[in-house]
Amino acid sequence: MTAAAPPPLGLAVIGHVNHGKTALVRALTGMETDRLPEEKTRGLSIALGFAFREDPAGDIDFLDAPGHEDFIRAMVMGAAGARAVLLVVSGVEGFGRQTREHLRIAGLLGLRDGLVAVTKADLVSPQARDDLRVQLAAELSGSFLAPAPIVFCSAVTGEGLKALGREISALALRTPPPEPLPGVFLPLDRVFSLAGTGTVVTGSLQGADLQAGTEAVLEPSGRRVHLRQLQVHGQAVAAARAGGRVAAALRGVAPEEVRTGDVLCTTGAFPSSQRIDAELELTPDAARPLRSGDEVRVLWGARQDLARVRLIGASALEPGGSGLAQLRFASPVPVHAGQRLLLRRPSPAATLGGGRVLDSVAPLLRSRALEARRELLAVASEGRLEPIAEALARRDGGAVSATEAARLSRRPAEEVRSRLARTFVRLDEDLFAPESAVESAMQAYLDRLGEAHHAHPMRAFVALGALRGGLSRTLSRELIVHVEGRLADAGEIRIERGQAALKGHDPFATLSPDQRARLGEIESTCREGGMTPPDVSVLAGEADSAALLGLLVESGRLVSLRNHALRQTLVFHPDALDAALRDLKAAFPPPAEFTTGEARAALSTSRKFIVPVLEFLDARGDTVRRGDLRQVLHPRNRFGPEPVPH
């Protein structure tokens, strides 16, 4: 089997203005990255430039960042699409102000490996080179490039270019592969139109590989598009590898409907949001602390956005410190958990620090839930699925949303559902619960039901709505319904007519002799009343009588009906209702039909009683109503009218 080709390496070329970055990239690749007329006129890069070099260790995409301080956004755009850096330092001038700024920004954006190229080496004497190495070591000390190889080279004479090429190959081999994401994530750094092709977008591909001929979505607009064609290094390809540069021709959208900074991504994988939770770190030389309510400029991917800061668990973030915060935006932003960001002060422009997105679709912070939020974000920072799922279960009453767990752990939702299904209990398509949470919920359900029985021993059942409502203060409703079904299947509880009871609960066993006697009196009075039963208020007037009346109804020994027009509750004995049905059948043999008034006369009762009785018989399937007429149904034909004999 042929080994898979190494992934492409995005290499951000950074450093001070006029230190020779573009000339060095041209010498390494033979390509000119200054493509704009203004760049050629001024001899100064003002936009991100692109070139590539084929290499056995994996294709190298050079992202040539402008060195001038006015173009920090373009520098961040290049660093955000890279996995390593090539720091360019002039051998004549040494470290410049933007050299330090670029190096610091690269570190804040999470880059951890790279090389140092000392350009214009043909103008540096051997003695000066030794002194320069000492200076560079001091400047790089404490940064991620402190151990990086330093190569002296010249784009004019060619000195050191082969050695630099070898170091770049070694860098490609040792750099970790692109971070996996739940789908395709392509921040767009260029949008243009080509005759015969239409809308074309470019960017540094992250997450999953991109396939030609598939559908995708543009965020934050939500516009669905079709990928007509893909190109990598000017050649049409069927698929583009994550980690490298790609150009995509889109169908279904005009160029003016796409903006630089938009993201082309897998549908549903990266929803946009106006709130993100992140871990932030301020640079030691930040001018002042960061406080809740401060406005910051956030640079990430190929976009920049203004946000308001809400710190989580702290009143201020001091220079050199780190902490959790929610960033709130005026409009939705498309980012992903794990994405790096740069914080800048809007005015005067200055780098404050950096950070990493922990939750790209964050809920609005509420004071009473801050501790649970801090706990969840702490485990989300590590990105491990199991601790994240356990934290979600603790926060959400035992239930775990696979969609949220996937977002926080930066994994595809289907993979997360599959993994959770191995060790968790499935509640529905997207919700799972740890077995320990299910066991605790079952015990809580039994305890709650037992408490209700103890508080009202003469009630045969407890309404499911009341049970679930009480438990939902601490348990997920989906988990409550699940354990309810489990307990019923195991015979631990009985469920009837929207009510539940413990298997051993017998309200009649709790009655005193006097209560038993009164119970019999109430039942006898209702039986004797027939179709004109006594008033409920009279039956329930004495001590314990209301509870005893409720027990008779719950146990089925009496039937409670409602006259909605009069807003009255009526209580009948089942024998009276059965007798009413027999009398109606005798008076109006099927298929004879009758009116409400005719039924009232046949049963010698009043309209107060006949209307709820007929509605009860309709509901039980003994009679059927068609307009103003009813018909008694034969038992074998309760799902339709009795056939008319010929």
Image (cartoon, helix red, strand yellow):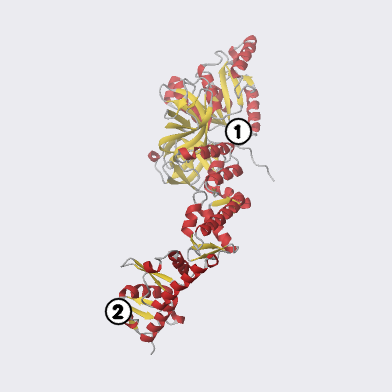
Q: Amino acid at mark 2?
A: Gly
**For residue 239, what is the image quadrant?**
top right
> Residue 449, percent across and down?
53, 58
The answer, for residue 402, to whether it is visible in the render is: yes
Is 522 left, or right, of 611 in this rendering? right
| Residue wearing tag 2 | 597
Task: Say if 98 sits above or below 504 in the image.
Answer: above
Quarter of the image that includes the C terminus: bottom left
Task: Say if 634 sits above or below 173 in the image.
Answer: below
Q: Marks 1/2: CA distance?
A: 95 Å
Is 446 left, or right, of 296 in this rendering? right
> Residue 490, percent across and down?
60, 63
Judging depth in this view, the residue of 149 and 593 nearest the camera is: 593
Q: Are marks 1 and 2 in contact (CB under 8 Å)?
A: no
**Which residue is at a point 46% across and 26% down the rendered structure image?**
290
Dot 1 falls on a residue whose secondary structure is: loop
Q: Which mark is residue 87?
A: none
Q: Earlier in the sequence, mark 1 or mark 2?
A: 1
> Residue 180, percent across and down?
58, 40
Task: Say if 335 sits above or below 551 in the image.
Answer: above
Dot 2 falls on a residue whose secondary structure is: helix
Q: Amino acid at mark 1?
A: Glu
Toward the bottom, the furthest residue is 646
| Residue wearing tag 1 | 54
**For residue 576, what is the image quadrant?**
bottom left
> Residue 241, percent across and down?
57, 40
Crowd class of label 2 (few under 14; some 14 to 19; many from 20; radius 10 Å): some
**Which residue is at a point 61% across and 52% down the rendered structure image?**
435
The answer, for residue 33, to whether it is visible in the render is: no
Judging depth in this view, the residue of 467 and 640 nearest the camera is: 467
